[in-house]
Image (tube, rainbow, N blue to C red):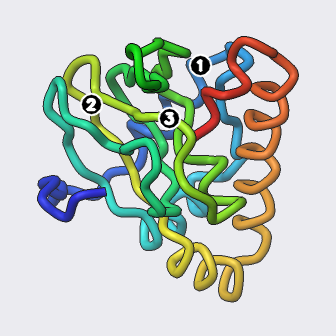
Amino acid sequence: MSSSFPTIDHYDVRGLARAMEQNTSPEGLNFGLTPAQWNILTNYLQPFNVAPGTVLIEQGDLDCSLYLVESGTLSVHYEDEKSRIRLAMVAAGSVVGESGFFSHLARAATVQAAGSCVLWRLNPVRFGELANRQPAIAVQMLLSVGAVLARRFKDRPRRIAST
C-alpha cells in the first residue's frame, strides 16, 4: 500500500463494527467483539480514506497488510497479458488482503476502489503486538477472517479473488 493514503484523524471504530453487523453475506466478517474490545482493537488499526479509482493492492506486490472495509466497494481483478478480468466486488463489512496476510506471498490480484471507501489497515507487525497483548481479540479476528477466506476458496470462481 502506498503511504500516501490520507489517514483519518478521528478513530471511531463504531462504523466498522456496524458495517460488519450489517453484512450478513458469506463475505461478511463477524469478530463478535464487545464495545470495549473494539476500542482496544482500534489501537492496532490504521483507518484511512480511499478515493474512487485508487489502487489499494497491486497484483504481484509483497505487502502483507489486511484491509477491513468500513464503507464503499472495492473491485478485485486479475490482469493477464490480454486483459483485466473482474473477479469480485467486495463490500462494506468484509475484508481484502487476507491471502497475502496469511501467506506472505505476492498478491494474486489487484484491488481498486470502485467509489469512495473508508478502510482500516492491519499490518503483520501490529497484528503481532495485538496477539501478544490481547490474544482473545486476535483469535476472534483470525477466526472471522479465516472463515471468509475458506468460503472464498470453496467458491471456485472467486477462489483467485483472495488477495
Going by the numbered disc 3, the residue's amino acid type is Ala
Please name the residue shown 28% across and 18% down the image: 114
Quarter of the image with the N terminus in it: bottom left
Report x, y in % for residue 137: 71, 65
Q: Nearer the viewer, residue 18 or 150?
A: 150
> Is residue 115 found left or right of 152 in the rendered image?
left
Binning the other alpha carbons within 10 Å of mark 1 as few (below 14), some (14 to 19) or many (20 upward) gives: some
SS category of the residue bearing label 2: strand
SS category of the residue bearing label 1: loop
Quarter of the image with the C terminus in it: top right
Please name the residue shown 41% across and 56% down the image: 121
> In the image as oriented, which residue stretches furthest toward the front?
81
Cβ–Cβ below 8 Å for labels 3 and 1?
no
Say which residue label 1 marks.
Answer: 23
Say which residue label 3 marks.
Answer: 109
Q: Is residue 101 above or below residue 30?
A: below
Residue 113 position by quadrant = top left
Residue 117's disc is 2
Please name the residue shown 52% across and 54% down the image: 66
Residue 36's disc is none
> Is residue 105 found left or right of 151 in the rendered image?
left
Between the residue at mark 3 and the residue at mark 1, the CA separation in whole angstroms equals: 23 Å
State which mark lies toward you, 2 or 1.
2
> Is residue 101 found left or right of 32 in the rendered image?
left
Going by the numbered disc 2, the residue's amino acid type is Cys
Binning the other alpha carbons within 10 Å of mark 2 as few (below 14), some (14 to 19) or many (20 upward) gives: many
* For marks 3 and 1 on the same chain, the one whose residue lies earlier in the sequence: 1
Report x, y in % for residue 68: 48, 43
State which mark lies toward you, 3 or 1.
3
Going by the numbered disc 1, the residue's amino acid type is Asn
